[in-house]
Structures are given as C-alpha cells and as structure tokens.
C-alpha cells in the first residue's frame, strides 16, 4: 500500500501551492486522479525515494456548516480518516487563528500522525508564527515557503521519514 499524505488547513494558507510543489515533475509526478470528488485532488509523488499518495483538500463551498472550522473539518474529515500522515498547514504571515486552533484540537483527537507546516515563511516572515505554532500541540513546526521553495527539501525528508 502506498502511504497517503493529506494536506489540510484553512483556505488560502497555500495547501494547493504546496501540493503542486511536492507533486511537481521534479519529484516524479506519476499520476493524477481528478474528479473523485470535486473538492479533492490526488497525485502520486516520489519524496526522497519514497512513493506517497498526496491528497490536497479544499473547502466545501456549498451546503457547508456555518463556521470556518466546520468547513475545514467537513472538507478534510474523510481524507484525514484515511491518512497515514497529515500535513497541517498554517499561514506564517497571517499567524495562528482561532480556526487553526479548533482544527488542531480536532486533529489531535483523530490519532493520526501530523506534521505541522508553517507556510509563507520566506525570509523572516514565519519566525513568529513558528513560535506561536508550538502552542497548537502538534509538535515542532516546520517552516516552508511553498511559493519560493524554502524548506521544501527538509519537509520532503521529514515526510519520507514519517510514512
Ligand atoms: P489554499 O487555499 O490553501 O489551497 O491556498 P493556495 O495554494 O491557493 O494559495 C493561496 C495564496 O497564497 C495564493 O495567492 C498563493 O500564491 C499564496 N501562497 C502560497 N504559498 C505561498 C508562500 O510560500 N508565500 C507567499 N507569500 N504566498 C504564498
Ligand atoms: Mg487549494
């Protein structure tokens, strides 16, 4: 079985950017399975020589629960339940929000291995958020910039070690 790595988090934190970077040609994109559901996207990727199935989650816009946390949970519940590893992505520029905190608390109860990723951490932008992110109780945050590529090699190594 190929291990499944699910990318979860608030809208706009950079989940899809990270998904595309991790699944990019340089990392041997093997297949794409679009349209299984409208809000999820899969790709098979090689990370440090390990084959993983990456799943990008997206917010459900229709018939969604009222709160942002509710939408995050609804959109990622099925994916998280089958995850061998969850990448919980927060925004290093926006900082940790109440929705992040609710989602983290819910995630801790799912008993899945989690890597906490502070994205948009290019330059010094993520340093404060990384400190704040410790309080989420999901281990040591990993600072990356999905857009600029900072920290992605380390993140790939970390993922490969954990699956
Ligand atoms: P998603 O809603 O979580 O999937 O987020 P997207 O991947 O669609 O990205 C949301 C926005 O954040 C886009 O405008 C991206 O260009 C931007 N973004 C993503 N990664 C980074 C990053 O590392 N640094 C900065 N500054 N912006 C980023
Ligand atoms: Mg997205």
Image: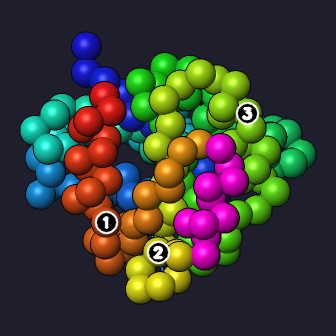
Question: Which range of residues does the magenta coloring cover?
Answer: 128-137
Q: Residue at x 66, y 64 (%)?
A: 132
Q: Residue furthest right?
A: 66
Along the viewing direction, whichever of 124 and 7 lies nearer the viewer: 124
Residue 32 is drawn in which quadrant?
A: top left
Q: Is residue 75 above or below residue 123?
A: above
Residue 85 is drawn in which quadrant?
A: top left
- Whether label 3 touches label 2, CB < 8 Å: no
Name the spot of residue 17 as percent of width and height, x first: 40, 63
Name the spot of residue 65 as percent of width and height, x first: 85, 39
Cα gap from disc 3 to disc 2, whole angstroms = 25 Å
Compared across the picture, whether 36 is left or right of 70 comes to left
Name the spot of residue 90 as percent of width and height, x first: 59, 59
2 or 1: tag closer to the N-terminus? 2
- Whether label 3 touches label 1, CB < 8 Å: no
Q: Is residue 44 above or below residue 12?
A: above
The residue indicated by pointer 3 is: 106
The C terminus sits in image quarter: top left
Residue 24 is drawn in which quadrant?
A: bottom left
Magenta span dominant secondary structure = helix
Q: Residue at x 67, y 74 (%)?
A: 94
Look at the image and tell me whether residue 33 can be seen.
Answer: no
The residue indicated by pointer 2 is: 121
Q: Is residue 88 above or below residue 38?
A: below
Q: Is residue 23 above or below residue 105?
A: below
* SS for dot 2: loop
Q: Is residue 132 magenta?
A: yes
Compared across the picture, whether 49 is left or right of 96 comes to left
Which mark, by number, is residue 151?
1
Q: Residue at x 48, y 29 (%)?
A: 113
């Amino acid at each position: 079985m190929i291990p499944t790595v699910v990318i979860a988090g608030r809208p706009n934190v950079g989940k899809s950017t990270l998904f595309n970077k991790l699944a990019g040609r340089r990392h041997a994109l093997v297949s794409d399975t679009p349209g299984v559901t409208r809000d999820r996207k899969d790709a098979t990727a090689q990370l440090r020589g390990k084959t993983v199935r990456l799943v990008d989650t997206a917010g459900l816009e229709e018939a969604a629960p009222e709160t942002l946390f509710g939408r995050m949970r609804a959109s990622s519940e099925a994916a998280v339940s089958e995850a061998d590893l969850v990448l919980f992505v927060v925004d290093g520029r926006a900082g940790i929000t109440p929705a992040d905190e609710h989602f983290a608390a819910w995630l801790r109860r799912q008993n899945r291995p989690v890597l906490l990723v502070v994205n948009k951490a290019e330059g010094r932008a993520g340093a404060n958020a990384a400190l704040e992110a410790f309080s989420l109780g999901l281990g040591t945050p990993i600072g990356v910039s999905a857009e600029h590529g900072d920290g992605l090699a380390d993140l790939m190594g970390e993922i490969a070690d954990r699956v």
